[in-house]
Amino acid sequence: MSDNQDKRVLSPIIKPKKDIEVIPPSTPTEKDSDKPGSELLFTAVGIISGVVEFIEDTRSATVTLSGNKYPLFYIPNNKGSVAFDALRKHIANTGNNNYRLIVYPKIIHFPGRDKPHQIGFQLVAFDSGNNEGMYGELKDLQFKLSGIWQFIPVCQTPCISVFKNFTEQRLEYIKKSDVSKRVKFMKASHIPLFWKDALVPPFRFNPKAPKEEQGRPYFVSIIAKFLPYKNAFGFESLAQMPLLEAPKFLKASKKMKAEALSLRKAEAAPYSEATKENTQEGSKFAMPIKRNKTDCN
């Protein structure tokens, strides 16, 4: 990096120990703070183009990209529902179901590094032909990704971790919500990314290493392409130089996550017991099945 670029690499992200962790940004230099539009934000949004199919009598849909079908979700708020219903209506009225869509990637990871993640997309908007704004900025399958470049325990591929950007309104909403809603709202999206010869290494936490030897997580902003054949994203270009400065963001603490998990287990326990009792009760009345010698085993 040049001397000018080095000035933008600031101190590591500090994580205070709170139930709701508000991760503050590093203090920007005077030079950077004077730049218009220099505010950083966590971002994951892009363009896909494919055949959309709504599943009858449900609020579910799929989009086909390069022969692969992916779930297409609506964002759980009023604007998200409006966009989803408008697309359904547009397809019904025009008979055309091939659209360019603005979407958020939705990644689901599972415990165990050997179990593959699942990818879906959340609908933001669809292109009805104006070709303006983001539709003109990005090509099909291109995404703007800004987040913390790191390995996570449940994925073999390094990820860009996109956290919930901080606002006072969001903080107030979280404070008024129950613990399960808080954790769900603050859940990060970990987007698997192939980045050959990355400018900076992905951060990898080593529980055995002393804190001073852990290294530093970088905040990166890039343009990436979704790769259906790899079910992941591939680096295309830098949007800005990697930084150790990150935007202010919200994150659920380990204590809050544990509390939400305990609550879910407690709520599920009565149903599990009822299912077990019904199964045992039903087995008392099950009639033995007589098999003929010709029956399959």
Image (cartoon, grey):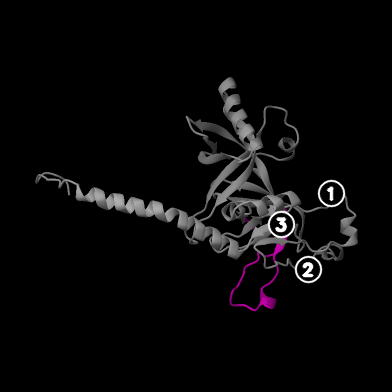
Which is more N-terminal, label 3 or label 2? 2
Residue shown at 73% from the left, 38% from the top: 134
Mark 1 nearby-residue class (10 Å; few <14, some 14–19, many ≥20)? few
Residue shown at 51% from the left, 57% from the top: 263
Which is more N-terminal, label 1 or label 3? 1
Q: Residue 168, relative to residue 93: is it above or below?
A: below
Q: Secondary structure at mark 2?
A: loop
Which is more N-terminal, label 2 or label 1? 2
Q: Amino acid at mark 2?
A: Ser
Q: Position of residue 70 (x, y in %)?
A: 53, 41
Mark 2 nearby-residue class (10 Å; few <14, some 14–19, many ≥20)? some
- Is residue 219 in the magenta section? yes
Q: Are marks 3 and 1 in contact (CB under 8 Å)?
A: no
Marks 1/2: CA distance?
21 Å
- Is residue 214 in the magenta section? yes
For the stretch drawn in magenta, what is the main secondary structure? Answer: loop
Report the residue that reaches farthest toward the top: 93
Q: Which residue is mark 1?
A: 37
- Residue range in magenta is 194-222
Q: In the drawing, does residue 29 fall left or right of residue 141?
A: right
Q: Which residue is mark 3?
A: 249
